[in-house]
Amino acid sequence: MAEQQHKSTRKSDETTDQVEETEVDVERKEKLDDDVDSILDDIDDVLEENAEEFVRSFVQKGGQ
Amino acid sequence: MSVRRVQGSEVEYGIAVKGQPHANPMVASTHVVNSYAAAHGLTRRARWDFEEENPLRDARGFDLSREVADPSQLTDEDLGLANIILTNGARLYVDHAHPEYSSPEVTNPRDVVVWEKAGEHVMRLGAELAGQLPGAAPVVLYKNNVDNKGASYGAHENYLMRRDVPFEAVVEHLTPFFVSRQVFTGAGRVGQMQDGSVHAFQISQRADYMEVGVGLETTLKRPIINTRDEPHADPKKYRRLHVIIGDANCSETAIYLKHGTTSLVLAMIEAGFLSSGLALAQPVTALHDISHDPSLKDVVELQDGRTITALELQGEYLRQAQEFVAREGSDEQTDDVLRRWADVLERLARDPRECERDLDWVAKLSLLESYRDRDGLDWDHAKLHLVDLQYHDVRPEKGLYHQLVRGGRIDRLVTDAEIQAAITEPPHDTRAYFRGMCLTRFAADIAAASWDSVIFDLAGHDSLQRIPTMEPLRGTAEHVGELFEQCDTAAELFSTLTRR
């Protein structure tokens, strides 16, 4: 939820006509953060459930 | 001077049966291989021919007796496990407790990428089909090397070399190179030590499992330089350098650079071009130390007392390769490898994160760090271990490597069309063409095959007929392509070949 709000705030910033340079930097950083958040969101969607159990049960016999 | 050289790769995949942690991995692996074979018309399942295999032959010039060998070193005994040859010339089989895909022989690093990636698809399909067997649970495969509980399985490289190069020279010059090349070949791992008991990230999956400098073993006391001497070719002319130190890479750039740079170093060793002076004081310790330092700033000690970083060591090899090329000339792919090698080393030196679009360990670390930042996770957190493992899941919808590629966050090197074709078609420029075409055209008449032979079972012949393929660069499309066009039956092909 907080993530959604964060994104819409950024969008309204983009539509502001007069943006000072420092704000551009902040915006770029926010965009990067948004990017990272969206990767993690995508990955959260596909990560196996119950990480602890899943990782514990991955036991292999040695190979070469 | 070229990256061109007969080479290939073998990858053992981690295997899990969903919801059945105690499922027998040999049975599950066998299902993967046999399901693939059955679905692709390889019903006769031409068997692997073991006649020329000598897993106990040592490059240093002696044979280990079978009595003192560990049972896991005996790879040439058919244990009744699945073992087939594909129409692309590859071998798909069960090795110990893992399904393994050995690529067909190719002539250059870029083709290694194409046919190794084709193997990922073969594995994905095999697992998918195995999961559809009556009563079966889904089978999941991982292109990685560790379970983080002590077990490791390999991703080997093979390079054909001139036999007359002294093996001491190979050991001297390859050891510092192998110890340091992990800065771009590492696949990244959450956990240090073989059992993962130290909670920290490291660059390489395999580093902690290498315990000695030089040796014959591949399953215990694993060496930086493996001395197995089975050339699968004319032993008077060739040796096959069997490399066991590498990680299983998902990144195409990493596979390409791993094979490309190693091919160049071998060319320099064969030419006697490399200067001495980079011998490490303690190679195994240096290998572990470098892997445990993702900042790439730590130094390791040379025999002469100097200290040097992994990137500087690689820089030394790069510099000599550039000099060698300036003297000897090169070709397009060689120039490309050199350019990328230099570029990657430069960016790694500036800030390793600059390589997150190119290299597995950097892409994985970047993802892990993002999770740590967002969720405040320590390195022992199960979610980080899961991200590490699932990065290597071969299923496009689940594998995190695939997810990053789809999101445009990792750069590709080859095309999907090339990989798709390589799933069924052999390379045109090695003997794999002959083997693959025999399977494509006459699968029902092939009793067995191996790297250096194809064995026919022909009507009208009492015994099996063996066609040796001891020369890796014969049996190419250029040599025998027309023959396959002219012959409608295996018998015709065989009689034409033996009449010559």
Image (cartoon, grey):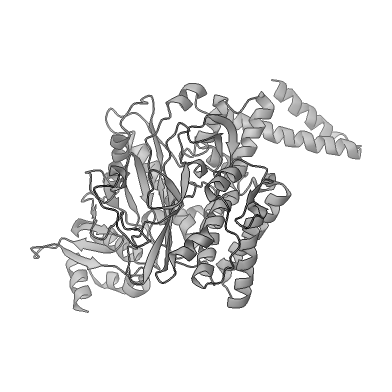
Position of residue A2 relative to residue B52, above or below, is above
Is residue B236 found left or right of B500 in the rendered image? Answer: right
Residue B7 % position (x, y): 43, 61
Answer yes or no: is residue A38 visible: no
Residue B160, quarter of the rendered image: bottom left
Q: Residue at x 48, y 46 (%)?
A: B248
Q: Quadrant of the C terminus of chain B?
A: bottom left
Q: Residue at x 35, y 55 (%)?
A: B90
Q: Is residue B463 visible?
A: yes
In this picture, residue A33 sits left or right of residue B65: right
- The picture places residue A49, in percent across and down from the top left corner, at 50, 23
Rendered residue at 39%/55% (across/down) = B103
Residue at 60% in and 56% down: B303
Q: Nearer the viewer, residue A30 or B487?
A: A30
Residue B179 coordinates in the image, percent (x, y): 55, 52
Does B138 sit above or below residue B274? above
Please say if B361 is above or below B414. above
Q: Residue furthest bottom?
A: B500
Q: Position of residue B335 (x, y in %)?
A: 60, 67
Number of callouts: 0
Q: Nearer the viewer, residue B433 or B211?
A: B211
